[in-house]
Amino acid sequence: MTDRASGRAWSAWVHGWRLVRTAPAIWIGVWVMTMVLAAPLAATMSGMIERQLGASTEADSAADGVNWDWWQEFTSQSSGLGTTFTPQIIGFAATLQNFSDFLDRTRVIAPVAGAVGLYLVTWIFVSGGIIDRYARQRATRANGFFAASGVFFFRFLRLAVIAGMVFGLLFAWIQPWLLTRWFGAATANVDSERVVFAWRLLVYAIFGLLLAAADRVFTYARIRMVIEDRLSATFAVVAALRFLAGNARRVTVLYVLDALTFAAALALWSGIAPGAPGGGASVWLTFALMQIWIAARIALKLHFIASETSLFQASLAHAGYTAAPLPAWPDSPAAEAIH
């Protein structure tokens, strides 16, 4: 049974990459969406830096390389969005900082929170079309993609309300209990920093597993809503829980494969991530490497969805999920029959 579950999970993992590769428009579209939503924040930050530097000698120094004295002065004198312009925004430090802020529940300033909220709403909209495209395993064109996105948008919004309550409970009650009461009691009489650090890693791991488990429930709930055309968000969650309970080994093996893939990408990024740029071409190289990492993260996120969709279809005999396509060459049934 274990070998069979591993084989099914491996097949879904491989098939997920095939789906991502055969639908590059989705990957490019999500990357463009990310850049567009981040552009207002970037423009605002650029204006703040330009006004602070002006025509001073620090401006010439900053153009030639990182001016650490000016950078510290700018951060200390800034408010709002300007306080996020720290050395941790460059390279691998930015990735670690994002993980740390997320797990420690660091308060997000209003402009960033607004951008994140807009991104989440936009992602909720397009995710219906993404799952639909991967489930059909063939091109749906822009009209089919956005039609599916519109159909499932309000259903996913209802599901997002339930997800918000669950994650709110985890961050409001479980996370403080783990990081304060349990962690504090376990390390109260410990003098070794290594032991304290190990306990903190354990707390992060436990909380991370709880978040991952909740995320899997709502991911498979969205998949079931799309593939089975479910209307009720509540019953979709119940159906997802039934699927997870009945296919725990397959789901776990696939999640481990996905997690190892992400860990490998993270390790590679830690080795090539740029440090503080100098002047001239090094600035553009740093920017290009950061964009490559963002694109890679989007590809990994899409692969998570594609592989889980593939596993669900294979496990519940939904692999034939193909609504009748419009007879448009070369994707019509006749063309497929000829092929």
Image: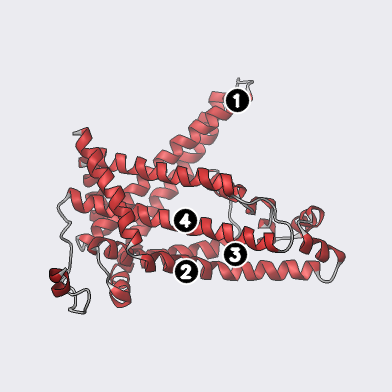
- Find the distance from the CA under tag 3 to the CA under tag 1: 37 Å
Label 4's element?
A: helix
Task: Give, as a three-letter code, the residue at label 2.
Answer: Met
State whether residue 190 is above or below residue 102: above
Density class for disc 3 (Cα within 10 Å; few <14, some 14-19, many ≥20) is few
**Which residue in the structure is indicated by mark 1?**
194
Residue 296, numbered circle: 4
Density class for disc 2 (Cα within 10 Å; few <14, some 14-19, many ≥20) is some
Residue 211 in the image, given as x and y percentages of width and height: 41, 44
Label 2's element?
A: helix
Residue 96 in the image, given as x and y percentages of width and height: 57, 45
Task: Give, as a three-letter code, the residue at label 4.
Answer: Ala
Mark nearer the viewer, 4 or 2: 4
Quarter the C terminus occupies: bottom left
The outermost residue toward the bottom is 328
**Residue 147 visible in the picture:** no
Of residues 248 and 239, the one drawn nearer to the viewer in this rendering: 248
- Find the distance from the CA under tag 4 to the CA under tag 2: 15 Å
**Colouring:** secondary structure
- Find the distance from the CA under tag 2 to the CA under tag 3: 18 Å
Residue 108 in the image, given as x and y percentages of width and height: 58, 55
Q: Is residue 107 toward the left or the right of residue 53 in the image? A: left
**Which residue in the structure is indicated by mark 3?**
111
Residue 273, numbered circle: none
Q: Earlier in the sequence, mark 3 or mark 1?
A: 3
Quarter the N terminus occupies: top left
**Which residue in the structure is indicated by mark 2?**
33
Q: Earlier in the sequence, mark 4 or mark 1?
A: 1
Q: Is residue 233 toward the left or the right of residue 69 in the image? A: left
What is the number of callouts on the image? Answer: 4
Task: Give, as a three-letter code, the residue at label 3.
Answer: Pro
